[in-house]
Image: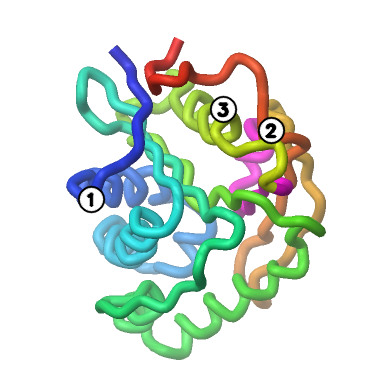
Amino acid sequence: MTTIRPAAAADLPVVRTACALAYLENPLVRWALPDAATRADACAAWLGPSLERYLEAGRVDVLTVDGQVVAVAAWRLPGAPGATPSTLPSSAGVLAALVGRTHAAHVLGALGGAAALAPARPGPYLNYLAVHPSHQGRGFGGRLLRHGLSAHGDDAGTPWLATTDPRNVPFYQRHGFTTTGTHRLGDDGPRLAVLHGTTTRRPGCAARDGTTA
């Protein structure tokens, strides 16, 4: 049985792990964390604080199979407070500790340059959509994406996202997103594609109780 539900704080370790394993060969992660031998643990450490903030002040949905969390979608909602964490570590601090201040500043500064490609009326931003590698290819990512889009009202603004993996672009296009621009991450990093959604509600989404059809 597959079910979609809001993530709880207790889900953080498995959510962090699923993201790290799903993003292991992602161009952004490979660029930010160049040591392949330590990349899985480093990615989990880097994303952990961000996922924790999303659990506190965003929207995080998980898809479970027979009660086991196998996929996650994390959205930053319009009007959500900025990142002012009162606890450590911070994502930026973890990255600096992992790869050094110079490379971390280079990565984060390059990512910040994509802000100009945001929609005129930004809506929910999909920061993470990840399926554990052992459960990929079964449509779980699409289910989570449709569920999240249906949950945001028509007045929530334009949903959007960014990806450095060109293989992801056709997937998002099938769900109503359009590439609106690209941004090169520094002189040595991958190209980031920014996609805007056409609507925040789509037919055929998950049922209200969270159980997928």
The residue where tag 1 is placed is: 9
Q: CA distance from mark 2 to mark 3?
A: 15 Å
Residue 43 against residue 1 in the figure, above or below: below
Circle 3 residue: 146
Q: Tell which circle, 2 or 3, labels the residue nearer the N-terminal end.
A: 3
Residue nearest the observer in this picture, 114 or 123: 123
Q: Are marks 2 and 3 in contact (CB under 8 Å)?
A: no
Q: Residues within 10 Å of mark 3 (few under 14, many from 20)?
A: some
Which region shows up in magenta?
A: 157-172
Q: Measuring 35% from the left and 37% from the top, which residue is drawn there?
A: 6
User: Residue drawn at (39%, 51%), measured in percent from left and top?
Assistant: 24
Q: Is residue 140 magenta?
A: no
Question: Could you tell me which secondary element the residue under label 1 belongs to?
Answer: helix
Label 2, secondary structure: give it.
Answer: helix
Disc 1 marks a residue whose amino acid type is Ala
Residue 194, given in percent of the width and then of the height, sits at 71, 53
Which of the two discs, 3 and 1, labels the residue nearer the N terminus? 1
Identify the residue shown where x is 40% and y is 57%.
54
Residue drawn at (64%, 37%) of the image = 153
- Relative placement, left or right, of 106 versus 87 is right
Where in the figure is residue 166, as x and y percent of width and height?
Answer: 65, 44
- The residue that disc 2 covers is 170
Q: Quadrant of residue 140?
A: top left
